[in-house]
Amino acid sequence: MEYTKKISEISTLCGTDILFICFSPAGKLFSFGHPSIESITNRFLNHNVPPPFGNNCALVDAQQMVRINQINQLYNEVASQLDASKNKKKVLAQQANGGEENFWWETPISELNLKELEDLDSCYTELLNELYITRSKMIASTTSMPTPRVPVQLNPVTPNKNEDVNNLI
């Protein structure tokens, strides 16, 4: 019968002892037991009989332990990712709520390294150029005279005593 084959497969795959009893509509008894009907009924009726251990149990236990270890490893990875996400969320919340982070222009210059100072210098240069261009456009729109578009220099050249000041302009 096909149901006994399926029950046997479940017993083998799960590494369990199984006792299956069913009655047909005509009252006929069908039963299946693994490892045997008698051993299962004796274990059920006499609770003190230990189940027999064989090679299947050791193999199933080993497979279960491997799978449990894989699941635990996966859980630990997901838990660490969750912790990292929570920490990132906390940092972002602090920044959004005005935490200790300063804007680039609020950081004291004495606390910056060389790279940060160069970046700050380029930011200020860009800001000054944008201010000059915007101011020039506003002046040009209010007057009919065009204004020259000269970028701002942060390190202006100082004339020597021997040079003519008009040559530098």
Image: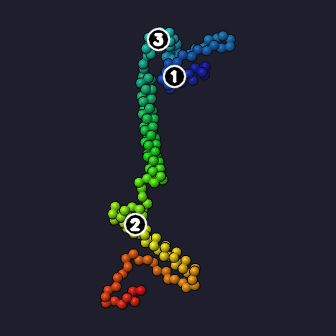
Q: Earlier in the sequence, mark 3 or mark 1?
A: 1
**Residue sitting at x 37%, y 88%:** 165
Query: Helix or strand or loop: what does disc 2 sit on?
Result: helix
Q: Which residue is mark 3?
A: 47
Residue 130 has which mark? Answer: none
Mark 3 residue type: His
Colouring scheme applied when the structure was drawn: rainbow
Mark 2 residue type: Asp
Q: Which residue is mark 2?
A: 119
Q: Nearer the viewer, mark 2 or mark 3?
A: 2
38 with respect to 168 (left or right): right
**Residue sitting at x 36%, y 66%:** 117
Q: Earlier in the sequence, mark 2 or mark 3?
A: 3
143 above or below 109? below
Residue 32: where, in percent of width, then height? 56, 16
Residue 104: where, in percent of width, then height? 42, 62
- Asked where in the image residue 143 lies, by quadrant, the reply is bottom right
- Mark 2–mark 3 Cα distance, whole angstroms, equals 79 Å
**Residue sitting at x 64%, y 11%:** 28
Residue nearest the viewer, comparing 63 with 160? 160
Where, quadrant-wise, is the C terminus in this rendering? bottom left
**Residue sitting at x 45%, y 33%:** 67
Q: Which residue is mark 1?
A: 11
